[in-house]
Amino acid sequence: MDLSTDSHNLDIQAYIVHLIGFIIFFYVLLCLCIVLGPKAFKDKPHNVIFFTAHPDDECMFFIPTILHFLQQGNVVYLSCFSSGNFYGLAEVRRKELQKSCKVLGIDKENLQILNESHFPDDPATYWDVKEVSDVMLEAVNRTQADMIVTFDSGGVSGHRNHISLYNAARNLVETNRLNKDIKVLILETTSIFRKYLFGLDLPLSYLTADFIMVSSVLNYLTGWRAMLKHWTQMEWFRWLYLTFSRYMFVNTLQQISKHSSKPNIQLRATKSSENYEELEWVKTDYPERTYDEKSHNICKLYKHV
């Protein structure tokens, strides 16, 4: 009787070991497919520019993509639209970002940190689309970038500064202000559940993304080292984020084209003047705002009957 029980326990243990082995094999195989396959984005643009909103965005959201492009031999630029002065730490955070970029391998000369009063570090503020897109275009022309990487319409965390960068990038595409050969990639915002699945989100990410970047163990640790340079931001919940967030391990990106960048909404005129026509966002993630079609700007919704 005891021998039978022991044999049964051994069978269960062997099954568990085989199951774990299969899962590990599956993930290794999937990672190889991603690294060697077309979704790893093997096309090599000469210059890639990342547009972020705050110091530490490059670490918290874009590590897999930044390191992928650097290791593929591309020139990487980073343009950060604010100095992170929400708590009055602008100068400290500027230095932290410089140290972070050094860890990542981004040349000091390729880092731009804006400190404009009209781009405040404020989660409640949308930046002016025209002003942001003008700065973006100047940076693209100056660096001769042939690829732009920034946030999507969800901004990963819903931060309005992040979303403003997407609105501006979309504006550049829609208004034909970019050279047609310049690719614009946006970082996919996922559900809160997927956001904290770490590597377990990899299979679904691979199936749904246009492009996918996966960090090696070394790159993941590099991301940690870079984020630790932002020491003023390392509150308790950031340690949990670094441990469990998929964005430290995998980035999924979509490409904006003029066709795909159109808002998936219905528009109707609400008010007109000789300078512009306001249009209500009838179907949108931001029902309290409107879309100004001619300036491609976000503005306050005027109530109407």
Image (tube, rainbow, N blue to C red):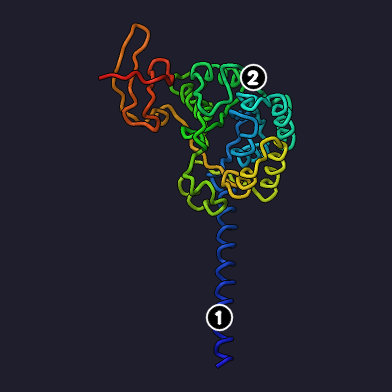
Indicate the quadrant containing the C terminus: top left, top right, bottom left or bottom right.
top left
**Looking at the picture, how far across and down is residue 94, in whole percent?**
70, 26
Vertical position of residue 104 compared to residue 205: above or below: above
How packed mark 2 is, by other alpha carbons closer than 10 Å (few <14, some 14-19, many 20 or more), is some
Q: Which residue is disc 1 drawn over?
A: 11
- Choose top left, top right, bottom left or bottom right for residue 263: top left
Measured as percent of width and height from the top left, residue 26 is found at 55, 60
Secondary structure at numbered mark 2 = loop
Q: Nearer the viewer, mark 1 or mark 2?
A: 2
- Which residue is nearer to you in this view: 138 or 198? 198
Q: Nearer the viewer, residue 147 or 108?
A: 108
Residue topped by disc 2? 115
- Apparent side of residue 62 relative to residue 281 in the rendered image (left or right): right
As displayed, is residue 25 above or below residue 197? below
Residue at the outermost left position: 305
Which image quadrant: the N terminus? bottom right
Task: State how far apart marks 1 and 2 are (Cα).
Answer: 64 Å
Q: Residue at horizontal 63%, vertical 28%?
A: 47
Number of the label disc, if any, that sits on residue 40 = none
Amino acid, disc 2: Asn
Give whichever of 159, 89 is nearer the camera: 89
Q: Position of residue 163 (x, y in %)?
A: 49, 29
Residue 217 visible within the image:
yes
Q: Name the amino acid type tagged 1.
A: Asp
Q: How far across and how far down the image is residue 51, in percent?
A: 58, 28
The residue lying at 58 percent from left, 27 percent from top is 146
Q: Residues within 10 Å of mark 1 (few under 14, many from 20)?
A: few
- What count of labels does the image hold? 2
Q: Are marks 1 and 2 in contact (CB under 8 Å)?
A: no
The mark nearer the N terminus, 1 or 2, is 1
